[in-house]
Image: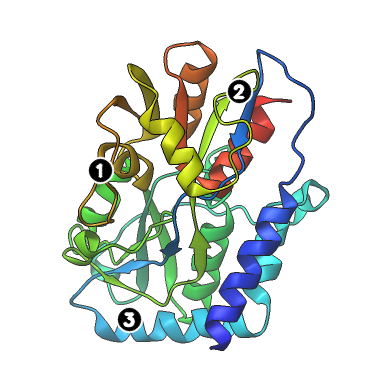
Amino acid sequence: MKKKIVVAVLAVVLACAFALVGCGANKNNVKIVEVKLTDEEYAFGVDKAQTDLKNRINAVLEEIMADGTLGDIAEKYFDDSKESERLKIDGGSVDGSKADKQLVVATNSDFEPFEYKAGNQFTGIDMEVVKLIADRLEMELVIVDMDFDSVVTSVGSNNIDLAVAGLTVSDDRKLSVDFTTSYYKASQMIIVKEDNNDFDGCTTVEAVENVLKGLAGKKAGYQNGTTGGEYIKGSEDFGFAGFSNITAQGYDSGALAVQDLKNGNIDLVVIDEMPARSIVKKTNK
């Protein structure tokens, strides 16, 4: 019960930190449709052959959720005044001769605020959490950056132990990895141009989806391999009916999708809530 409460409270704190990004319609700006479309959980994906590693990681996750450390880490990435406190981490190099001493993590660094780059170093909520885990397990952290849709399937090969990339738990991904304890509740949300009024007055998922069903000939962007694409295209695994009237367009990152939205090439973007808020905040500066 405590774990569920901590995760729920963290989600509320993070959402509040991004409220009121901006006011006033501007055709060059973008905005979020303030309705959470899905109910998801993030977890880390562990090599199925390493049950002991999963158990040790779970022990650390449960401790830092219970004592507030996870919330403190997250807050640094939503409060610009604390930017100087954010951890910057070198990626390191995989050394097969030290497999039992290295924690090798696959990620995709285009998912701010969970994982992104500061120069040549890695930073973000997930990156700081996994560094803390590696330190407590007395292991050297090595981070391997790759396309998002390769993160999960890479685990168990090339000495990669762990997938850390804002991963939504799903049955399909469970075929490739074992998931740790869930540490964050997530939702898909929609980004549109600020002068778009299609979703004005929508306050429920049903209302938003009714609008989506009527958008014949429209295009929706998403980051390749993410839940946003499954939401638009439809997925039995996730339980999404999909929208056959909307063309789904994949991009290497959410930021690229939003840029194409601004360029007028697509009509909306579906992406996880917190990355959506980060992208909108930066885009509208």
> Of callouts 3 and 2, which one flags the residue occurring earlier in the amino acid sequence?
3
Q: Is residue 95 above or below residue 133?
A: above
Query: Which label lies toward us, 3 or 2?
Result: 2
Name the residue carrying label 1: 234
Query: Which label lies toward us, 2 or 1?
Result: 2
Snapshot quadrant of residue 253? top left
Element assignment for label 2: loop
Q: CA distance from mark 3 to mark 1?
A: 34 Å
Q: CA distance from mark 2 to mark 1?
A: 25 Å
For image coordinates 23% across by 48% down, the residue present is 235
Residue 197, disc: 2
Q: Name the amino acid type tagged 1.
A: Gly
For image coordinates 54% across by 32% down, the residue present is 191
Q: CA distance from mark 3 to mark 2?
A: 49 Å
Element assignment for label 3: helix
**Residue 43: % across, % down:** 41, 67
**Residue 57: % across, % down:** 42, 79
Name the residue carrying label 3: 53
Q: Nearer the viewer, residue 61 or 29?
A: 29
Element assignment for label 1: loop
Q: Are marks 2 and 1 in contact (CB under 8 Å)?
A: no
In the image, is 54 to the left or to the right of 91? left
Q: Name the amino acid type tagged 2.
A: Asn
Residue 188, disc: none
| Mark 2 crowd level (few <14, some 14–19, many ≥20, 10 Å Cα) | few
Q: Name the amino acid type tagged 3.
A: Leu
Q: Nearer the viewer, residue 5 or 134?
A: 5
Q: Is residue 234 above or below residue 167?
A: above
